[in-house]
Amino acid sequence: MPETLVPRTLRSRVEDRLRFFPAVGLLGPRQVGKTTLARGIAESSGGRGKRQPPGLYLDLENSVDREKLADVHGYLRRQRGRLVVLDEIHRTPRLFEALRGIIDERIHGGEPAGQFLLLGSAAVELLRQSGESLAGRIAYLELGPLDLRELGRRDHTRLWIRGGFPRAFLAPSDGDSALWRESFIQTYLERDVPALGPRVPAETLRRFWTMLAHAQGGLWNGAAMARSLAVDGKTVARYVDLLVDLLLARRLPPFHANVRKRLVKSPKVYLRDSGIVHTLLRLDDTEAVLGHPVAGASWEGFVVETLIRAAPDRTRASFYRTATGVEIDLVLELPGDRTWAFEIKRGQAPPLGRGFQVALDDLRPERAFLVHGGDERYPKGSGVEAIGLWELAEVLAAAGGGQVQPKRRQPSNR
């Protein structure tokens, strides 16, 4: 399947935001498909209204395109009526102040929405720079790698093993996919990380990245990481901040519940793309992954990313764990005061753990699921449904229909 033919579920949301906001910021790591998506939206934006021309794409890493914006106001004034896509805009921070004036001028002239689509691969930089100048004028969306809802249930093993970066997933073979992912990692180490700020030795960051892969989904222990790398705690915290900013790692916070139990306070840390996890650990195919101790944690991270991306807007994600080890792998707080709980297992007919049942008594979520590696859906008792990942992602996406559901029951204090 050619990359350009993989429909992205985020497209409709980007177009919806452009109908309301003057600017939309599209965040996502490199090579995830932001440019392909943005070009498609720009090309189809023509024809609205009175013979509106198609949108304009400018790559701000390209010196020719940067030169066009030497006179920002003059150049963009001539593009009025067109959607303008500015790729890697966080590398040209001077533009943000100019965009604020241009947007305000156009709003006063009766053009309130759909003016600019801003792309960036460093989330914090784009959020900080645009937030200072475009507050109230911009909405943000995040494009991740390809996910199960875009590819279909039959591709779930291939997607888990190779990850969702389009060129990795669509490579002719597992070997080609692994080579692409290795090149991707090297590009970040040698080019993108140094461009973002203080120099981090590539070898040190590679070791840290690999350590996170080994500890996939574990509780963050900065002190242990710092000792292993022979650096201080602040330095290792900066390393994880960097990977989170690049949208390559996720810090999943602990759920704070009103229960009479001592809860863990450290976040769990996941590398967000399972294919990157496998490449860092030199696991190039299904057999290698299944034979490695990381298989269960890798599957858990894959499920967590799939469900968070399928969830409705404004959903909050966390996990629940007590000091005694009672745990819920993923807790999603959906709009309308709805809480769903998820236990994640890789097997096709896994048992329901006692710790999960105790945790459900603590939280009393509206719905509870045991996510497994198969396709069947059936009740497990105690109000828990066993369900395959693809179907659960569809159920979760449908939960964003806007209807407010009953509030969850009050948690017990046992």
Image (spheres, helix red, strand yellow):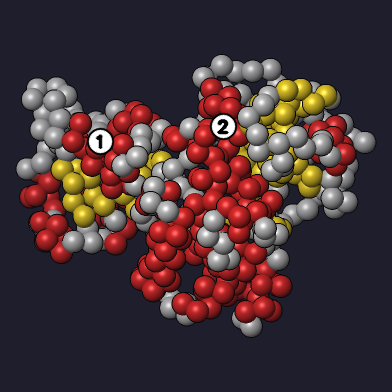
Amino acid type at image mark 1: Ile
Give the residue furthest to the bottom.
230
* Disc 1 from disc 2: Cα separation: 27 Å
Classify residue 212 by image quadrant: bottom right
What residue sits 84% from the left and 45% below the top?
A: 326
Could you tell whether 363 is left or right of 340 in the image?
A: right
x then y, percent, for residue 11: 35, 33
SS label for mark 2:
helix
What residue sits 53% from the left and 22% below the top?
A: 398
Identify the mark at residue 41; answer none if there is no mark.
Answer: 1
x then y, percent, for residue 281: 58, 65
Residues 37 and 21: in front is 37
Q: Where 407 falls versus 93 (above or below)?
A: above
* Viewer-side label of 1, 2: 2
- What residue is pinned by disc 2? 390
Could you tell whether 412 is left or right of 53 in the image?
A: right
x then y, percent, for residue 181: 44, 61
Could you tell whether 29 is left or right of 102 in the image?
A: right
For marks 1 and 2, the one nearer the N-term is: 1
**Local crowd at mark 2 within 10 Å, few (<14), some, or many (≥20)?**
many
